[in-house]
Image: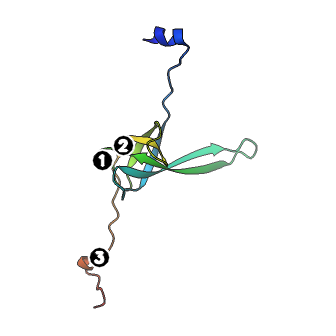
Amino acid sequence: MQDEREKKGQKKAIRVEKIGRVLGSKMDKSRTVLIEGRIQHPFYKKFIRNRKRVMAHDESNISGSGDMVRIVKCRPLSKCKRWRIEEVIEKGEIEENGTAEDGIDSGR
């Protein structure tokens, strides 16, 4: 298989993997993931934090808000989605919104 690629001049694609935290899970099969990284400034040696929000495809809706996930770059799935959720590394805490059932009076 690899010999066939070498004959044709094709190279194996390198998979780009990142780890991020799910920010939003309100859409069906789509998640908003925050990728954080730290780089050191070449001259000042101060660590700079860079953040990137991306849309990721979640076929089976296994991730929720606050989860730590591994995402993999893939072909364009829609206008904004270029990433796919590979696995859920760590489950996060789901923030619950206060409603009238929780004892908050609606004012009526």
Q: Do callouts 3 and 2 mark residues in contact (Cβ within 8 Å)?
A: no
Q: Residues within 10 Å of mark 2 (few under 14, many from 20)?
A: some
Q: Mark 3 and mark 2: span between their CA atoms?
A: 31 Å
Q: Which residue position is annotated with label 1?
A: 62
| Residue farthest along the right direction in this orientation | 43
Q: Do callouts 3 and 1 mark residues in contact (Cβ within 8 Å)?
A: no
Q: Position of residue 34 (x, y in %)?
A: 49, 51
Q: Earlier in the sequence, mark 3 or mark 2?
A: 2
Q: Which residue position is annotated with label 3?
A: 99
**Residue drawn at the location 32% of the way across and 44% of the way down:** 59
Q: Which residue position is annotated with label 2?
A: 89
Rendered view: 4 above or below 78: above
Q: Mark 2 and mark 1: span between their CA atoms?
A: 11 Å
Q: Mark 3 and mark 1: span between their CA atoms?
A: 25 Å
The quadrant the C terminus occupies is: bottom left
**Residue drawn at the location 32% of the way across and 74% of the way down:** 98
